[in-house]
């Protein structure tokens, strides 16, 4: 399913097990660069697991084992000798609940860059913070209070600061796990507009159980059920004329 | 109000619809020219334009359906998309009536004229005027302009009846004029439909702008608010 642009993430025959349970079964999916790919499906279908597989967040869970291929820019990220820290720099993540550190807005955004250890000059770091906050469409709201705690911001603002934090380390891919499910409709609309703009530069994979959100923001949609990929196609195709009956039943709200 | 990327997509759809409207208007004007000038060569261009309009209709409909499916529009956005689907359909039908007129024009050009055309050009001017103004009302979201256009439909209907009566006398007098007279009656019938469809476009414009349904004279009956 190669798009007009190159594929950034190439998943082939990928399986993931929790102990003896197979949570992802034979997933084959190519995610094109600079597009938004949404993963939808009923609770427990494996959508978050699949998302977390892309930057090996599942490694932290006991008893997880994988096989099959998961390549980022052609390189198998599960092969021996992969630098997982570097992988997670390239593949940033934004979570369901905004999780700013109890530090200033500035420090939240600068954090990852400092961790990277390339002792940037203060002026250079200032630039990175400003660029990232601008890209995350929050700069105008916080420019005058960069030294205030990020915890003072509203939920929607915190989430955009978290997105800025992910952008600061110059990732290629951004994974978003239900990034707006804890936000009100207006804050959600802001995040959605932001996602739309971010795809000019980044490859975005988003998990959502809000189907309407998937429809609004994504270029492609993958529908998962019971750990299997049922259908993967252009979002406009999935939401107007899905090929699989299960997809049709799910998106029209007949189950799930 | 903040700009949504959805607004941009709505605007693109509107622009495409306007391009289709411009082509439809051009097609009708050419069809009438080919009739008045008795020039069958003009018809070639009409068939090409009609093909183009048909292609645009499919494209616009698909795009509007996708926008409804993907954005779950409400209120004004929803009315615009539903109205756009209907106007799209109206424009395509108007194009077809233009083609019918061109076909009559081709047949009529191969035979001597029954009589100089007087009422048909008048009717054509009225119908194309209604089309132009209805599109103008839609483009500029001008429901008041649209209301005025709807009122002009009666004049077109009267002319159609008048043309029919007149041609009936020709046919009764000289049966060899029947084929040609029938073609002229068909032309007037097609013009009348173009005026009706222009009225539909106005009704959609008013619906989009004011959320009011005015068709079937709903505004004139007292129990409708």
Image: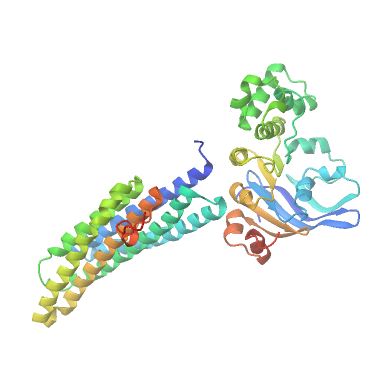
**Residue at x-position 69% and y-position 46%:** A206
Residue A75 shows up from this direction: no
Q: Position of residue B36 (x, y in %)?
A: 17, 62
Note whether A218 is above or below A142 in the view shown. below
Name the residue rendered at 66%, 31% in the picture. Answer: A154
**How many discs appear?**
0
Q: In this view, does B154 lie to the left or right of A184?
A: left
Which residue lies most toward the left here? Answer: B173
Q: Can residue B193 be seen in this view?
A: yes
Depth order, front residue of A151/B134: A151
Horizontal side of residue A48 vs B23, given as left or right: right
Q: What is the x, y in percent for residue A174?
A: 70, 40
Residue extending farthest front: B223
- Residue B30, horizontal then vertical, whole percent: 25, 59
Q: Is residue A150 left or right of residue B98?
A: right
Question: Is residue A242 left or right of B130 when viewed as pictured?
Answer: right
Q: Quadrant of residue A256?
A: bottom right
Of residues A204 and A240, the one nearer the viewer is A240
For the C terminus of chain B, which image quadrant?
A: bottom left
| Residue B119, image x, y percentages | 14, 64
Question: Is residue B175 depicted above or below A236 in this figure?
Answer: below
Closer-to-camera residue (A6/A209): A209
Q: Quadrant of residue B23?
A: bottom left
**In this view, B183 is above or below B46:** below
User: In percent of the image, x 25 and y 62: which residue is there?
Assistant: B31
- Closest to the observer, A8 or B154: B154
How are the residues colored? rainbow
Residue that protrudes farthest toward the bottom in the picture: B175
């Amino acid at each position: 399913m190669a798009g007009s642009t190159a594929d950034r993430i190439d998943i082939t025959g990928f399986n993931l097990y929790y102990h003896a349970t197979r949570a992802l079964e034979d997933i084959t999916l190519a995610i094109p660069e600079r597009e938004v790919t949404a993963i939808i499906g009923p609770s427990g279908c494996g959508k978050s697991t699949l998302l977390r597989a892309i930057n090996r967040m599942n490694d932290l869970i006991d008893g997880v084992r994988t096989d099959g291929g998961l390549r980022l820019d052609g390189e198998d990220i599960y092969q021996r000798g992969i630098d997982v820290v570097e992988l997670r720099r390239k593949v940033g993540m934004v979570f369901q609940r905004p999780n700013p550190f109890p530090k200033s807005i500035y420090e939240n955004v600068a954090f990852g860059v400092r961790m990277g250890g390339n002792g940037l000059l203060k002026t250079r770091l200032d630039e990175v913070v400003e660029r990232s906050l601008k890209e995350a469409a929050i700069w105008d709201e916080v420019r005058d209070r960069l030294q205030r705690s990020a915890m003072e911001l509203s939920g929607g603002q915190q989430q955009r600061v978290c997105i800025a934090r992910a952008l600061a380390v110059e990732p290629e891919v951004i994974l978003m796990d239900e990034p707006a499910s804890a936000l009100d409709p207006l804050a959600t609309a802001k995040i959605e507009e932001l996602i739309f703009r971010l795809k000019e530069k980044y490859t975005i994979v988003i998990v959502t159980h809000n189907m309407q959100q998937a429809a609004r923001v994504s270029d492609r949609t993958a529908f998962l059920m019971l750990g299997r990929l049922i259908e993967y196609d252009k979002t406009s195709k999935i939401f107007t004329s899905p090929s699989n009956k299960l997809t049709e039943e799910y998106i029209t709200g007949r189950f799930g | 109000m903040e700009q949504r990327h959805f607004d941009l997509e709505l605007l693109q759809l509107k622009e495409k619809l306007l391009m289709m409207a411009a082509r439809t208007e051009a097609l009708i004007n050419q069809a009438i020219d080919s009739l008045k000038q008795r020039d069958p060569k003009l018809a070639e261009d009409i068939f090409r334009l009609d093909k183009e309009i048909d292609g645009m209709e499919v494209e616009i409909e698909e795009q509007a359906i996708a926008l409804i499916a993907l954005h779950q529009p409400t209120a004004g956005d929803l009315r615009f998309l539903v109205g756009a689907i209907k106007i799209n359909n109206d424009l395509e039908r108007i194009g077809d009536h233009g083609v019918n007129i061109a076909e009559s024009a081709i047949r009529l050009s191969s035979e001597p004229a029954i009589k100089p055309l007087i009422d048909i050009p008048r009717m054509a001017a009225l119908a194309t005027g209604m089309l132009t103004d209805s599109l103008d009302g839609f483009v500029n979201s001008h429901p008041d302009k649209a209301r005025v256009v709807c009122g002009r439909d009666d004049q077109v209907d009267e002319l159609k009846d008048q043309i029919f009566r007149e041609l009936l006398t020709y046919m009764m007098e000289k049966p060899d004029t029947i084929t040609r007279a029938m073609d002229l009656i068909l032309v007037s019938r097609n013009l009348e439909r173009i005026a009706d469809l222009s009225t539909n476009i106005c009704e959609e414009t008013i619906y989009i702008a004011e959320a009011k349904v005015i068709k079937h004279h709903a505004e004139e009956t007292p129990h409708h608010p």
